[in-house]
Amino acid sequence: MGLLYIKALHIIFVVSWFAGLFYIVRLFIYHTEAEDKPTTEKDILQAQFKIMEKRLWYIITWPAAILASIFGFWMVYELNLWSSMWMNVKLGLTMLLWVYHIYTHFLFKRLQSDMISWSSKRYRLWNELATLWLVSIVFVVVLKNTMDWVYGTVGFFAVGIVLMLGIRLYRRLNK
C-alpha cells in the first residue's frame, strides 16, 4: 500500500478517535445530569445513554484508536522516523493519549454499571484534556523539527492551566 494511502487512513482514524473521545465524555455528562431527573425520566434517559455510549465506544472509538495506531506505526516504520526528536515527542504524547483513552474506558465501565462517581463539571474538565492532547500532537506534527512546536505546546498547556485556575478562583469568589 502506498505511503499516501497509509497517511490518509491514519488521519481518518485519528479524526474518528478524537471524535469518539470528545463525544463519549459529552454523553457521560448527559448521563450524569440525568441523575437529577425524576425517577421515570432518569431511568429512560440513563438506559438510552448506556446504549449510545456502548455503541460509540465499541463500534467507533476503540476501532478508530487501534487503527490510527496501526497506520501511525506503519508510517513511522516506512519512513524510518524512530530517531527523529519530533516523532519521539509525538509518540510520547500518543502514549499519554492512550492512558487518557484507557482511563476513559474505566469511567465508561463505571457508568455502564450505574456507578456515578464524577460530577458533570468534572467530566467537562476531563473532556478538555483530550483537546490539549489534540492541539499538542498537531503542533508537534505540523511544526516537526522547528523549536516552535515546543513553545507552542508548552504555551498552550500554560494557557490551559491558567484558565483552569482562573475558573476555580471565579467559582470560589462566587460562593
Image (cartoon, rainbow, N blue to C red):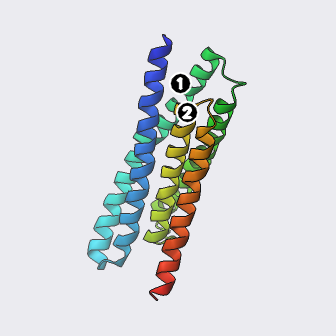
User: Which quarter of the figure has residue 84?
Assistant: top right
The image shows residue 44 at horizontal and vertical percentages of: 28, 66
Displayed quadrant of residue 98: top right
- Residue at x-position 31% and y-position 72%: 42
Q: Nearer the viewer, residue 124 or 51?
A: 124
Vertical position of residue 172 compared to residue 129: above or below: below
Along the viewing direction, whichever of 175 and 94 lies nearer the viewer: 175
Q: Residue furthest top?
A: 2
Q: Vertically, is 102 above or below 107? A: above
* x and y, in percent, of residue 36 in the image: 35, 78
Of helix, strand and loop, which one carries label 2? Answer: helix
In this view, which residue lies farthest toward the bottom? 175
- Rendered residue at 41%/30% (across/down): 12
Q: Looking at the image, tell me whether mark 2 or mark 1 is earlier in sequence order.
A: 1
Callout in the foreground (2, 1)? 2
Q: Could you tell whether 93 is left or right of 6 in the image?
A: right
Residue that label 1 marks:
71
Which amino acid, by three-letter code, is at mark 2?
Answer: Leu
- Cα–Cα span, label 2 and label 1: 21 Å
Q: Amino acid at mark 1?
A: Phe
Say which residue label 2 marks. 143
Q: Residue furthest right?
A: 83
Q: Residue at x 52, y 78 (%)?
A: 169
